[in-house]
Image: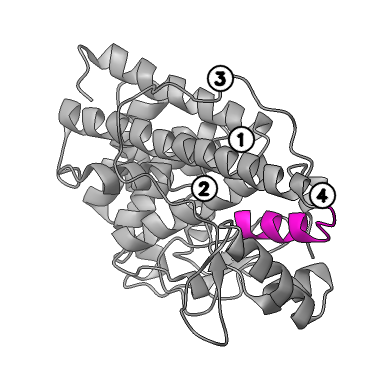
């Protein structure tokens, strides 16, 4: 979306981040929303790293935390969703490189590989930190764009620096709000497909702000779709005399890319036969879609997909006020083990 001035572009991006933070806190589908946001951002970063993640690589626990299997070789995977102090980015080279996974940390069981020796990386990061100190003062979203550019130019790690630059820039900008796990900007850059890697100055800042807005809008669109699905699911459940554990099955499906009878049986302490029966009921009602087309080892997903296009900024919300609280959307009730 074209803006009349950089100020309006910044205000647009920041207002979308504020709206997203509000939805993450107050949405009746906030639990599956947070999980699916983490998945989307992690996958966007992996695709930009030319190492796309498959659904089978994703490991989601009962709290909605997203990790990946040992088959995930993408860079920066340990930093996604993990915290680092902004001061450490500016002043502590070792902590920063450990956060990114470029240097093995005792707390990280699977360390990354790198091309440069550790002392060389530390020296280069120190030079990058000196470069940042010379940047003129600017708001966080714009400052993050320039920090990411300077990282790519110096390439301290030698491998994975493109993803590392995005993680740093995201942490400095959208990560300051509670609206990104580290890949919101990557999501927007991927969708917009603008020439950002070699952009500089105002062109880079314009592309960066547009990516922030696009990524946030994609998450907001997802929230609307999840709410619509949840309302339809609630209507179906309330229409049944004996819904049984159907509510729990759909809650589980909303927070994962796909589920199987084995997943349902384990999470809800059911027999596999009982899980299959519930999945069949939801599938017949159109609330789940069978994805494999097989007679066995089937997997299911809710019929909610990512938006087909980025669309315009600040689109009207079809649910301007939150609907009646969905009884399965409470964080405590979704704590599957």
Q: Residue at x 29, y 55 (%)?
A: 162
Q: Name the residue under label 3.
A: 320
The answer to which of marks 4 and 1 sits earlier in the sequence is 1
- Locate residue 105 relative to residue 45 in the image: left or right: right
Q: Residue at x 41, y 39 (%)?
A: 218
The answer to which of marks 3 and 2 sits earlier in the sequence is 2
Q: Mark 1 points at which residue?
A: 24
Residue 156 falls in image quadrant: bottom left
**Which of these two is toward me, 189 or 283?**
283
Q: Do the numbered discs 3 and 1 sit on residues whose CB atoms are within 8 Å? A: no
> Magenta segment, which residues?
241-254
* Residue 333 numbered mark, or none: 4
* Circle 1 SS class: helix
Would you place residue 301 above or below residue 308 in this image? below
Calculate the distance from the C-alpha at mark 4 to the C-alpha at mark 2.
20 Å
Q: Name the residue under label 2.
A: 37
The answer to which of marks 4 and 2 sits earlier in the sequence is 2
């Amino acid at each position: 979306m074209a803006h009349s001035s950089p100020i309006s572009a910044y205000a647009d991006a920041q207002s979308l981040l504020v709206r997203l933070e509000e939805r993450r806190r107050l949405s009746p589908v906030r639990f599956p929303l947070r999980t699916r946001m983490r998945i989307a951002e992690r996958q966007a970063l992996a695709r930009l790293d030319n190492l796309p993640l498959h659904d089978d690589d994703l490991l989601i626990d009962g709290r909605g935390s997203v990790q990946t299997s040992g088959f995930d070789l993408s860079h920066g995977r340990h930093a996604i969703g993990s915290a680092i102090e902004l001061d450490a980015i500016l002043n502590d080279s070792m902590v920063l490189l450990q956060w990114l996974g470029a240097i093995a940390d005792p707390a990280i069981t699977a360390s990354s590989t790198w091309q440069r020796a550790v002392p060389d990386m530390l020296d280069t990061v120190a030079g990058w930190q000196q470069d940042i100190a010379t940047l003129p003062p600017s708001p966080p979203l714009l400052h993050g764009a320039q920090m990411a550019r300077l990282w790519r130019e110096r390439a301290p790690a030698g491998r994975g620096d493109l993803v590392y630059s995005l993680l740093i820039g995201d942490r400095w900008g959208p990560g300051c709000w509670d609206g990104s796990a580290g890949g919101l900007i990557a999501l927007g850059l991927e969708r917009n497909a603008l020439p950002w890697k070699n952009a500089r100055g105002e062109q880079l800042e314009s592309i960066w702000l547009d990516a922030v807005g696009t990524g946030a809008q994609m998450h907001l669109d997802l929230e609307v779709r999840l709410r619509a699905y949840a309302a339809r699911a609630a209507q179906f459940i309330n229409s049944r005399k004996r819904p049984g554990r159907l509510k729990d099955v759909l809650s589980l499906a909303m927070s994962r890319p796909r589920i199987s009878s084995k997943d349902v049986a384990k999470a809800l302490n059911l027999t596999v036969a009982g899980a299959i029966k519930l999945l069949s009921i939801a599938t017949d009602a159109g609330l789940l879609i069978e994805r494999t087309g097989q007679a066995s080892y089937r997997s299911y997903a809710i019929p909610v997909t990512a938006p087909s296009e980025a669309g315009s900024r600040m689109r009207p919300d079809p649910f301007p006020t939150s609907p009646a609280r969905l009884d399965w959307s409470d964080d405590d009730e979704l704590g599957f083990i």
